[in-house]
Amino acid sequence: MKNRRGIILLAMIQICLTGTALSQDVILKKDNTTVLSKVLEVTSTEIKYKKWSNQEGPTYSISRSEVVSINYQNGEVDRFTDNTTITPAPQQTVNQPQPQVQIPQTPSQTDPEKSKSHYTRSRVQFSLNGGVAIPMGDFGVTDKNKYCAPFSFFGDELETGCGAAKTGFNASLRLHIPIYKQDKDIVGIPLKFNVMYNGFSDAEKRAYRELWQQIGHMMNEQYGTNAYQFQVTKYSSYLNYSFMGGIDYTHYFSKSFGLFVEANLGLNLAQITKANISNLLGGSVVYVDYDNYIQYHSGDGMEVRYKTKANFAYEIGGGLFLFDHFSIGVFYTGYSPSQVSPTWREYINGSSYTFSNGSGETITEITAPKLKVSALSIQLGVHF
């Protein structure tokens, strides 16, 4: 009963539309809405038409499954069911071709991902890096004749060691700023703060101990006493703080694997930490010369300090990117030679005094040979 009422209602709507819109094609949809149009083509799957109010406008299409019937302006009617195939009236085919207007699309409408890179190096990137620093060249040798570190300020009087460094660690903070991107190739500017720490090698510690034993023996002979027997209680170490910037290049072979190289230049602050030497015999010694001049010599110990020096820094290196957030790299870091200036002070009962030699000459600062620092670093990095 309900089906009959629906069919009668649709028939009445079609009759009304036929009588009121004879000058246009009327598409009746299953949701009981109508489209006033000019039908261009009816296929087995869709109906193409232009809006009657804008026949010069774009061409629209609607699925046949959504349409009940088409009432043409000449009075003919096409009705559609799921099992029938209806072709349009002859005058409704493309006998009068209409130009189709294509709506231009912006790049963001077509494929927004094409303008974006899938790799993190194409964006500003922060990273933490750390690893071992292996001394190279003069920074790692133990030849006593080279005098490459702060132990040779006694000249030829004592056989002093080179002060060679041992393997330490290297840590850095890096900021990568991309400046050029082309597919899988990315060029950027790295900004880096680096800290490198190296202690004295075991051989140099032995040489340093022997050096102070010789100094104590020399002072006992010079002052005619037996009051000095020095022991090293704290060894110096090397600290280098560098600020560098440069250029880097990255090539990706896949999303999870890439290669990078970089070169940096900048400024370094070279520091040698202080050394402490105690006197095992302790106390103070009074020395009276021929002019009855009384001079006091320390029996507590010595302290050696070094001035921080600024010098030129450079670095070259490269490595692998893994999974776009991890890296392993090898870097060669070098600093221009800097003049080491140690300052000696002695202690008497805990009070500090400048060091003086046997003739009463005060020694406050002594110039030692230039220190040459270079190291090969193997670093692991985490990139954000």
Image (cartoon, rainbow, N blue to C red):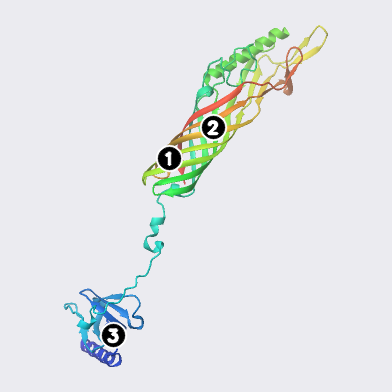
Q: Residue 50 location, x and y as percent?
A: 31, 79
* Lower sequence index among marks 2 and 1: 2
Residue that carries the numbered disc 1 in the rendered image? 260
Q: Nearer the viewer, residue 260 or 65?
A: 260
**Farthest residue toward the right?**
291
* Three-letter code, disc 3: Val
Q: Residue 48 location, x and y as percent?
A: 27, 76
Q: Secondary structure at mark 2?
A: strand
Q: Quadrant of residue 271?
A: top right
Q: Nearer the viewer, residue 145 or 229?
A: 145
Question: In the rendered view, would you say 81 is above or below 199?
Answer: below
Q: Secondary structure at mark 3?
A: strand
Residue at the (38%, 67%) spot, across then down? 104
Q: Is residue 49 left or right of residue 365?
A: left
Q: Nearer the viewer, residue 116 or 104?
A: 104
Which quadrant is the N terminus positioned in?
Answer: bottom left
The answer to whether residue 235 is seen in the rendering is no
Q: Residue 325 location, x and y as percent?
A: 42, 44
The answer to whether residue 260 is seen in the rendering is yes
Residue that carries the numbered disc 2 in the rendered image? 196
Q: Secondary structure at mark 1?
A: strand
Marks 2 and 1, how far apart at CA:
22 Å
* Lower sequence index among marks 3 and 1: 3
* Three-letter code, disc 2: Met
